[in-house]
Amino acid sequence: MNWLWRGRAWVFGDNIPNDGGLMALRFVREQQYDPRILAKHCFAEVDPGFAASAQPGDFVVAGKNFAYGNAHVQGFLGLKGLRVALLAESMSRGPYRCAVNAGVPFLTPLPGITAAVSTSDELEVDFLTGRVSNLTRRTEVKGAALPPVLREIIGAGGGIDHMRQRLGLLAASR
Amino acid sequence: VAIGEIVVCEADVLETIDLTLPHYFRMLRSLGVTKLARPERIVVFSDHEVPAYSERVASLQRELRRELKELGVRYFYDMGRHGISHQSIVEHGHVLPGMLAIGADTHATTLGCVGALAPPVNYEAVQVLATGDIWLKVPETIRIVVTGEAPLGVLSRDIAQWVIARLGAERCDYRVLEYAGPAMAHLDMDARMTLCNVAVDIGAKSGVVEPDELTREYLAPRAKGEFDLVRSDPDAVYELVFSVDLGTLEPMVAAPPSPDNVVPVSTVAGIEVDQVYIGSCAGGRLEDLRAAAAVLEGRTVHPGVRMIVVPTSQEIFARAAREGLVEQFINAGAAVTAPNCGPCYGNLSPLAEGEVCVGTGTRNEPGRMGNAKASIYLANAATAATAAVLGKIADPRELMRERRS
């Protein structure tokens, strides 16, 4: 997997909830897990134009406490379906695990990122070092890199694909 | 291991639910996984969609029963023997001190009530089913020392809400909240479940109550295996030690839009109410049902209000019936239903646009209980029952004092 990404920024504010912010709760009730379907509904209630306009390689730049609330995975599977990455000022444990499990590359915490980036700025992000370069403004923000164990899961495509790799390996070693 | 390190751990028990498990099994089948790592450690509850409310759900449940048999999962608490998973799994003695209990639903932190570490996961349960293990980040711990005695009108829900509000989300994120201190000896297992349950709503990884003699007595007739009262080392390092004097608390309400928006009940007094809900894994236990019934005794539900009572488990339902609480609810004009998660999930007794609910549910984000333009106030059961009688939010202590005199 390529860990150096270049793309446009989509900036969202602080305290965007998971249910009803990142993704409508109805997809949890319907138990929808298909990233291609969920991709079309990301941020529908916050920024209805986002899902249709975001390009693979783009970045969701989120504020503090992104995707708070019950840790439903559907919103993150939607981000995976769009093939975008996530840069968040802060994110609590539930969404943090969801991002890993869905296989969405992310950096958090990134204090000050929403002030350092505007929507449609061109960014270059190195997930191996945690460096975010704003190519439009010629500025840089440094965050913590993804821990290697989690990078391995995301690199495999998410928790399910990582499990498949592991089960394949386990079977081969017997 | 060191704090912040990421480790892969084997789960001692995996708690799963009817809503998601059939979909997880379908996912595993589609990947060609036909064997679970440790079927004997998997415990399954019907709680989100029980009784089945549609043919679609009924056929999913039929599929689930067949899969469980085929995969060799023997602990399945189906309709009639069920309860909300986080309550029933403890009642049935599956969770013991020192265990790593992985729960495939948000409020699984409840399982920490017996001194287990119980980090909740959701979709990741798919991997735990297949591999038996999970990655975890070694957390910091905040020790909460509880002292004093709760005054009139203060229930364990208030203690829990007050603690999370005082500590705040940034402080609690990814940390374990460990409850200890002299007052814990007077807080029964129900109260302990509530304390650990609400911990997740501030982002905590788990709530844990230091196990003691009360834990031993509670578990002795229930435990599915042998256990020791595993406690923190005396020289354990805490990120913070935080003291709570119960004597200083008052009934609290979490106003929209989040569970940590906690204010004293007087701040929101006078708000008119359409629905009152007593139930959920955060507030449908005996303590809650008794408090609500005590307020309702000799009174009736306001004509403008509908009230629904959902005991958290069959065990609690039976005790409530034995104590006459169920009859009190019915006489007051409330509906009582079998244990389930429905109202918190918006699929039982949902709210219409503009409606206001006061209840003991888990969360209060817009849309959580139906329409996104409905308002949800989380309160203790006495405050909720008071609102049912008066048709508006009010301090429950007035009605409780009248009852006493």
Image (cartoon, grey):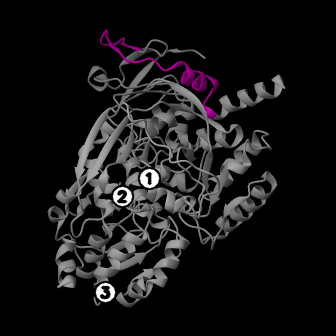
Residue B237 shows up from this direction:
yes
Q: Which residue is mark 1?
A: B212
Could you tell me residue B258's position as x and y percent?
31, 51
B201 shown above or below B348? above
Mark 2–mark 3 Cα distance, whole angstroms, equals 29 Å
- Dot 2 and dot 1 residues touching (CB under 8 Å): yes
Q: Chain of mark 2?
A: B
B334 is within the stretch colored magenta = no
Name the foreground residue: B70 vs B163.
B163
Is A142 inside the magenta-drawn segment?
yes
For the residues bearing labels 2 and 3, Cβ distance under 8 angstroms: no
- For badge 2, the amino acid type reads Ala
Q: Tell me how far mark 2 sits from mark 1, CA to CA.
A: 8 Å
Q: Which mark is residue A80?
A: none
Instruction: Check the residue under mark 1 and report the chain it is in.
Output: B
Residue located beneath label 2 in the image: B185
Q: Which mark identifies residue B297?
A: 3
- Name which residue type carries label 3: Glu
Badge 2 local density, few (<14 within 10 Å), some, or many (20+)? some
Position of the C terminus of chain B by quadrant: bottom left
Q: Is residue A115 above or below residue B21?
A: above
Q: Based on the displayed image, in which of its 4 quarters is residue B262 positioned? A: bottom left
Local packing at callout 3 (Cα closer than 10 Å; few below 14, some 14-19, many 20+) is: some
The disc numbered 3 marks a residue on which chain? Answer: B
